[in-house]
Image (tube, helix red, strand yellow):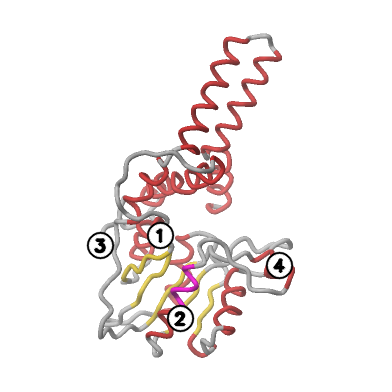
C-alpha cells in the first residue's frame, strides 16, 4: 500500500505534472474568457519549464546527495558481500524480447559485477522486484540474475530478492537473506543520489553496510547555473532528484530511516 500511494502521489506532484496542470488551467481560463488569469497560469508554466528543464538547477540539487557518501578504501579489504539495489533493469523489454535490457542506472549492475570479480569470495545479493505485472513479465531480480550468469558470476554466489518495490522493502526483505554477523563487511551499491535514503533504510533494518555509490550524474563540483542543451532531459533530471528530498522526509517520519539526512 505504501509503495502504491507514494508512486501515484508523486505522479501527480512531480514538477512536470504540475507544469502540465498549469497549462491545462491556462487553457481552461482561455475558454472561460478570463485572459488575465490565463496569462498568469501560462506564465507560471513557462517559467517552471524554463527553470526546471532549461537550467542546471537539478545538478545543484543532486550534488549534496551524491557527495554525502564517498567510496571506502577497499585496498586489502576482506569483503563479505555486496548488496546491489534494483532500478537499472528494463524488465518489460527484457521479458518481451528475451534479452538483458538495462537503463541509464546500469552502473549499479556493472559495478556490482566488477566488485564481485574483485572480491571472488564475496556474496552478491540483488534486491528488487519492481512492478511485477503482465506487462513487465519478470522481476528486476530475474533480469539481474540473467545478467550475472551471462557475465560469469556463479549462481552459488548470487542471492536474488524479487518481491521488494521500494528502497525500504529492499532493506527489510534482504536483511534475513543476509543474516549479517559481527565483523562482516557488506557494501551497498546504488546510485549516488539515492545513497542517503538507502543507507538510512538499511541502518533502520538493522544492517551495518558501507556505502559504495555509483551512477553519478554530476562532477560533484558546485558550478554556476547554466543552460541545458535539452529541456526534456533537464526536466526529467529535475523530476527524479526533487523526489529524493520529500522521500527522505517521508522515510524519516514513517520510521523507515535512521535519520532525516543520513551521514557517514
Is the C-beta separation of discs 1 and 3 under 8 Å?
A: no
Closest to the observer, 258 or 233: 233
CA separation in Å, label 4 and label 2: 24 Å
Residue 257 image offset from top left, x and y in percent: 36, 56
Q: How crowded is mark 2: few (under 14 residues within 10 Å), some or many (20 or more)?
A: many
Is tag 3's residue or tag 4's residue first in the polypeptide sequence?
4
Kindly identify which numbered label has been placed on residue 3: none
Q: In this view, does 237 lie above or below 128?
A: above
Can you tell which of label 2 and label 1 is closer to the viewer? 1
Is tag 1's residue or tag 4's residue first in the polypeptide sequence?
4
Instruction: Name the residue located 27 percent from the left edge and 81 percent from the top edge.
Output: 182
Kindly identify which numbered label has been placed on residue 216: 1
Main secondary structure found in the magenta portion? helix
Is the C-beta separation of discs 3 and 2 under 8 Å?
A: no
Is tag 2's residue or tag 1's residue first in the polypeptide sequence?
2
CA separation in Å, label 2 and label 1: 22 Å
Kindly identify which numbered label has been placed on residue 137: 4
Can you tell which of label 1 and label 4 is closer to the viewer? 1
Is tag 4's residue or tag 2's residue first in the polypeptide sequence?
2
Instruction: Name the residue located 35 percent from the left edge and 57 percent from the top edge.
Output: 196
Q: Is residue 170 above or below residue 115?
A: above
Q: In this view, does 152 lie above or below 36?
A: below
Circle 3 is placed at which residue position?
A: 264
Closest to the observer, 68 or 142: 68
Q: How crowded is mark 3: few (under 14 residues within 10 Å), some or many (20 or more)?
A: few
Residue 53 image offset from top left, x and y in percent: 50, 38
Is the C-beta separation of discs 3 and 4 under 8 Å?
A: no
Label 2 element class: strand
Circle 2 is placed at which residue position?
A: 124
Label 4 element class: loop
Amino acid at each position: 500500500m505504501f509503495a502504491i500511494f507514494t508512486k501515484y502521489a508523486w505522479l501527480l506532484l512531480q514538477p512536470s505534472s504540475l507544469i502540465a496542470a498549469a497549462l491545462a488551467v491556462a487553457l481552461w481560463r482561455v475558454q472561460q474568457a478570463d485572459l488575465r488569469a490565463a496569462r498568469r497560469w501560462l506564465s507560471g508554466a513557462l517559467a517552471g519549464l524554463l527553470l526546471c528543464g532549461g537550467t542546471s538547477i537539478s545538478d545543484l540539487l543532486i550534488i549534496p546527495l551524491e557527495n554525502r557518501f564517498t567510496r571506502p578504501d577497499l585496498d586489502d579489504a576482506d569483503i563479505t558481500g555486496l548488496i546491489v539495489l534494483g532500478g537499472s533493469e528494463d524488465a518489460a523489454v527484457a521479458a518481451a524480447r528475451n534479452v538483458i535490457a538495462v537503463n541509464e542506472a546500469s552502473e549499479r549492475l556493472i559495478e556490482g559485477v566488477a566488485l564481485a570479480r574483485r572480491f571472488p569470495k564475496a556474496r552478491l545479493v540483488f534486491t528488487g522486484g519492481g512492478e511485477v505485472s503482465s506487462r513487465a513479465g519478470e522481476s528486476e531480480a530475474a533480469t539481474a540474475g540473467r545478467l550475472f550468469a551471462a557475465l560469469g558470476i556463479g549462481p552459488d554466489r548470487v542471492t536474488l530478492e524479487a518481491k521488494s518495490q521500494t528502497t525500504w522493502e529492499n532493506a527489510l526483505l534482504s536483511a534475513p537473506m543476509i543474516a549479517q554477523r559481527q565483523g562482516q563487511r557488506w557494501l551497498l551499491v546504488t546510485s549516488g543520489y539515492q545513497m542517503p535514503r538507502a543507507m538510512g533504510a538499511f541502518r533502520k533494518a538493522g544492517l551495518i553496510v558501507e556505502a559504495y555509490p555509483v551512477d553519478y550524474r554530476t562532477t560533484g563540483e558546485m558550478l554556476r547555473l547554466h543552460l541545458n542543451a535539452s529541456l526534456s532531459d533537464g526536466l526529467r533530471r529535475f523530476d527524479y532528484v526533487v523526489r529524493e528530498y520529500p522521500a527522505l522526509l517521508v522515510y524519516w517520519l514513517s520510521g523507515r530511516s535512521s535519520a532525516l539526512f543520513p551521514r557517514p
